[in-house]
Image (cartoon, helix red, strand yellow):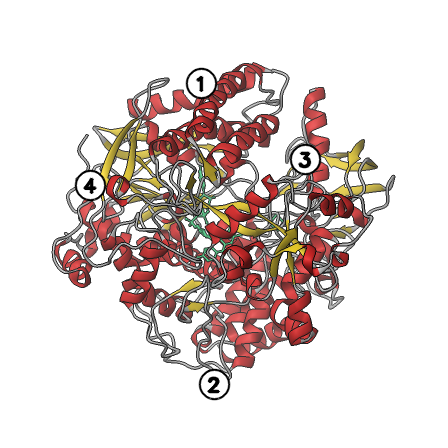
Amino acid sequence: MVFDSKIPEGPLAEKWTKHKFNLKLVNPANKRKYDIIVVGTGLAGASAAASFGEMGYNVKAFFYQDSARRAHSIAAQGGINAAKNYPNDNDSIFRLFYDTIKGGDYRSREANVYRLAEVSNNIIDQCVAQGVPFAREYGGLLDNRSFGGAQVSRTFYARGQTGQQLLLGAYSALSRQVAAGKVKLYKRTEMLNLVLVEGKARGIVARNLITGKIESHSAHAVVLATGGYGNVFFLATYAMGCNGSAVWRAHKKGALFANPCFTQIHPTCIPVHGDQQSKLTLMSESLRNDGRVWVPKEKSTVEKIRKKEIQPNDVPEDERDYYLERIYPSFGNLVPRDVASRNAKNVCDEGRGVGETGLAVYLDFRDAIKQFGIDVIKAKYGNLFQMYEKITADNPYNTPMMIYPAIHYTMGGLWVDYNLMTNIPGLYATGECNFSDHGANRLGASALMQGLADGYFIIPYTIGDYLAGMPYDKVPEDHPEFKKSEEEVKHRINKLLNINGNRTVDEFHKELGRILWENCGMARNETGLKEAKKEIRELREAYWKDVKVLGINEELNMTLEKALRVADFMELGEVMIDDALDRRESCGGHFREESQTEEGEAKRNDEHFSYVSVWEYKGDNKPEVLHKENLKFENVKLTQRSYK
Amino acid sequence: MEKGRSYTLKVWRQKNAASRGEFKTYQVNDVSSGSSFLEMLDILNEELTKKGEDPIHFDHDCREGICGTCSLFINGRPHGPEEEITVCQLHMRTFQDGQTITIEPWRARAFPVIKDLVVDRSAFDRIIQAGGFISVNTGAAPDANAIPIARENAEVAMDAAACIGCGACVAACKNASAMLFVAAKISQLAMLPQGKVERKRRAQKMVEQMDKEGFGSCTNTYACSAECPKGIEFTHIARLNREYLTSKFTS
Ligand SMILES: Cc1cc2nc3c(=O)[nH]c(=O)nc-3n(C[C@H](O)[C@H](O)[C@H](O)COP(=O)(O)OP(=O)(O)OC[C@H]3O[C@@H](n4cnc5c(N)ncnc54)[C@H](O)[C@@H]3O)c2cc1C
Ligand code: FES
């Protein structure tokens, strides 16, 4: 298997400029002879589709929601990074690059991350020009805040709705191209297969979710921008429809999958209320600036609270364990996401977790309110407190909040080269669905940046390099390869509809989520992972024998939609486990129990694991093959993180 | 948290766009007061599936009140009885144990029913396509701080931009007018210097498209604002009217 990352030679800061110059161009008059399929209209997809349209290409954009504006990017709250250095606090492209690569625990490519930092400033310019109402200071200039422990203020934001505003900006640009006739939208349409002709990506097979019609779409190149696969865990902060099907189908057609086990767990989510829960809600990380995290020292106190014999506020100071402050005196409650998450899990595993399920810790504002006054806290967190109260019916001004970690982002994804092309010629992956920029851990406010960098400023150039070498001829949609791919899809659908077993799709999905969360979540070890692999296989077999999917294909059938997604998650989950098994180091958000320091902290192993894990599909029921892309670091020095 | 609650649901069932719909009554048990409204429907759907009955179809995605996908008309009100939230943010503790709850889709000529509680809102997309944008190509933007924008104006723009495009305003209006939706976008862009260049054309085109889609006319009842989950104010409608009139007089 040959795969070349195509990282340009030369000094880091000149790579992208030189590379751009070397890319082949498509003559403006010839662009209209090329068709491009974009799957996904989140930040990564909408920005790419709009830009392609402006450049003159013919674009078909697909998404499963009823409107392009509803892609999951809409839910991002906190903000987007850029190296503008408007606050004059000595930020720079190099510093943003450095923070991002260090934040990723040195498991991403220097060249990609540097380019991301380099184009970050153009993103802000573009969005402002589109009418994105970023927060401003009284002087009328843009406001910045610091985010995720960064030492500079480089995060641009639009209240708590940054993702929404950026997406609506991209959606408006997309809408303009629809009006111009350059982009055609396919709403409520789900990609279920990739079509290769002579080894090149030439189209997709998709299901019209309203009529059930299985449709073929042909193009000269296919761009996947389908977001993350975190819903493999069932409970996550993702929107309900987020799925891994598009990337998984591409993988089964030969696209390599990188770092599948790198998923991000966010420490401040609202805890699970019970087994009727359908998803988890994120509370902004900024809360840890003033809230103190604790659980009772004794299990007996936990019991008393649970039986409502006492209230959390009744627990005296010396019976509280402010465990983050105790273990990490210099960072305290502000340790990075992974450390905060793992420690919450530890105290809950010890039986000291609070709440009805025992899977929660307190985040207490009592002392902050005492110190700064209620008005200051209200001004900072009012909307978050209100949102918390709406969901839990508890008032955080009077009683501590309860939080617990949840799956929030997937760093893993399709392997891409520097041009964002997968190893399949003509197949690209952008945004969260590729693996490229965040290594083993993503820094806050960098996913929005990456999605828009990919879509506005990278792929519009790199795709031309490929298309310039392509003949204009179109592959007809009744080509045997399309027919074959359609048949594969129809076969899967019929199979699912005909099982008529006893267990619902959600029951299977919950079980899959449990296996992965317990064994391939925050902490992993070899025994657990091996057991999980066996369990997933059994579950998958049971699924294809006992799942109950009602209705027919030729109608809106949301159970069928879910069933197809869960079927793919069942397969993807197994590769996550293979990958976690191989990575016998603790890294980023992943605590590999066999690899820890004497104090029980995560121990990265650069000597043996400084590589991207690249998985190749070899056929049903055959083990996937692991390839390694070794990471070279020429501009940063690798250091172990310490927060003590 | 209280477990084991029961509710009687009267739900609009409609097989597809062409068929006639009707209300059907269901009993749902074992609901926790901490469950969200949509989780309550999940519970019922799991039961229906087990019994071999087609689950109730409803639109939803983020379940956090931001994507604008969820769209249920509950006991006569879009998004249910609570102020300034979407139905996905509504929790069962709002309802009394044993209560009867009526659930319908958005009702509007411009939003035809697709199935059960799912409607087609693509009219909104077409209105934005008619002019709800600033014409700037990728890469053609000046430095973001080149044009200062008064904070008050930026804040008004943001208030308007908070619209999630759910369509509750249309569902709330006795004329099924889309004025608040259109006004929010026009207002956002009119408040920003970048949006001023195209303001006349934008107002005309968007209003024209709105009329074409079959939305009713606005008779200033303000039901739209009252039911908007994001609290978008009807003052934006006044701004739209101004934008539209000046565009008519000066074009
Ligand atoms: C609650 C929350 C808060 C966040 N906050 C921040 C933040 O403050 N800052 C930050 O930088 N990042 C944040 N993130 C992460 C960030 O929002 C996402 O990583 C990013 O928006 C992903 O964008 P995307 O374009 O890659 O994918 P998405 O926005 O997920 O879009 C995926 C698109 O693909 C389509 N699609 C998927 N599968 C298929 C299929 N099979 N067929 C057809 N279409 C398909 C969907 O319809 C959709 O249009 C947050 C994430 C969450 C969950
Ligand atoms: S499901 Fe997204 S707003 Fe309700």
Task: Tell me whether marks 1 and 3 sit on the same chain.
Answer: yes
Q: Secondary structure at mark 3?
A: loop
Between marks 1 and 2, how big is the CA–CA gap? 62 Å
Disc 3 C-beta below 8 A from ligand 2: no
Labels 3, 4: front one = 3
Between marks 4 and 2, how big is the CA–CA gap? 52 Å
* Residue identified by numbered label 3: A275
* Residue identified by numbered label 1: A491
Across and down, in percent, residue B58 comes to 65, 39
In the image, A209 versus A243, the foreground residue is A243
**Mark before the other along the chain sequence, 1 or 3:** 3
Chain bearing mark 2? A
**Mark before the other along the chain sequence, 1 or 2:** 2
Disc 4 C-beta below 8 A from ligand 1: no
Disc 3 marks a residue whose amino acid type is Asp
* Residue identified by numbered label 2: A139
Chain bearing mark 1? A
Between marks 4 and 1, how big is the CA–CA gap? 32 Å
Q: Secondary structure at mark 4?
A: loop
Task: Tell me whether marks 4 and 2 sit on the same chain.
Answer: yes
Asked whether the residues under the numbered discs 4 and 1 touch, taking CB atoms below 8 Å apart as contact, a structural biologist would say: no
Kindly identify the residue that appears in the image at 61 percent across and 27 percent down. Answer: A507
Labels 1, 2: front one = 2
* Residue identified by numbered label 4: A472
Q: Is residue B10 left or right of residue A359?
A: right
Relative vertical location of residue B29 with respect to residue A400 in this rendering, above or below: above
